[in-house]
Amino acid sequence: MEVIPKYNRIKQMLIFSGVLLLAVLSTGCVEENNLDQNITNQSEDEPVEINNSKAGDSKMRISIESNGETVVFELNNGQAAKELYEQLPLTIEVKNYGSNEKIFYPPNKLNTSNTPLANAKTGTLAYYAPWGDVVMFYGNFGTAGGLYELGNVVSGGEHIKNMSGTITIKKIVN
């Protein structure tokens, strides 16, 4: 009768070893897949850079150049911010609006699902859904129906007020 318990113990050890082996192999595949996802898709004339930050550490950042000055924004994880980021690079006209903001119209309207409403202040990058324009605030504003936050200025916010003519918007690759 001792043969049966030994057989069960051997069977259990084989199953445990097999599960452990599968777990180790799966982890290797996931790590390789994560490395593949860190390669940024860019046009042929731009170098491909690899993001060596850990998963979840990468931020969507954009630069906006106007009149020799650069403003850098960090985008949030809302759907509208992601869709704007995917439309880059852009060379587009910027316009004055009111006394505290500059606006531009991206080629495609942005989906605002999972995008926070904005309480705009100096340095806020927002999307005004009813008109389909992106707004860069250089003065405090507050809230408005249909105004969604895309991100905030990281550097160069003092240059927003002086933007005019054509601006160039690019992804910043980590």
Image (spheres, rainbow, N blue to C red):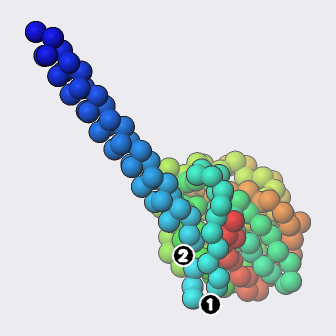
Picture quarter with the N terminus: top left
Q: CA distance from mark 2 to mark 1?
A: 12 Å
The answer to whether residue 130 shows anywhere in this view is no
Residue under the image location 71 percent in, 82 percent down: 168
Q: Amino acid at mark 1?
A: Asp
Picture quarter with the C terminus: bottom right
**Within 10 Å of the Cα at label 2, are there few (<14), some (14-19), or many (20+) other Cα atoms?**
few
Side of 166 where 157 appears, left or right = right
Q: Quadrant of residue 134?
A: bottom right
The answer to whether residue 23 shows anywhere in this view is yes
Please state the horizontal and vertical placement of residue 4, each as a whole percent of the image: 13, 16
Please state the horizontal and vertical placement of residue 98, each as a whole percent of the image: 77, 67
State the mark number for residue 45: 1
Residue under the image location 86 percent in, 83 percent down: 68
Q: Quadrant of residue 165?
A: bottom right
Report the label total.
2
For mark 1, give the secondary structure.
Answer: loop
Q: Relative to 35, is 27 above or below?
A: above
Residue under the image location 63 percent in, 69 percent down: 50
Please state the horizontal and vertical placement of residue 161, each as a whole percent of the image: 85, 70
Looking at the image, which is closer to me, 17 or 160?
17
Side of 75 where 12 appears, left or right = left
Side of 102 where 48 appears, left or right = left
Q: Amino acid at mark 2?
A: Asn
For mark 2, give the secondary structure.
Answer: loop
**Within 10 Å of the Cα at label 1, are there few (<14), some (14-19), or many (20+) other Cα atoms?**
few
Q: Residue furthest bottom?
A: 45
The residue carrying mark 2 is 41
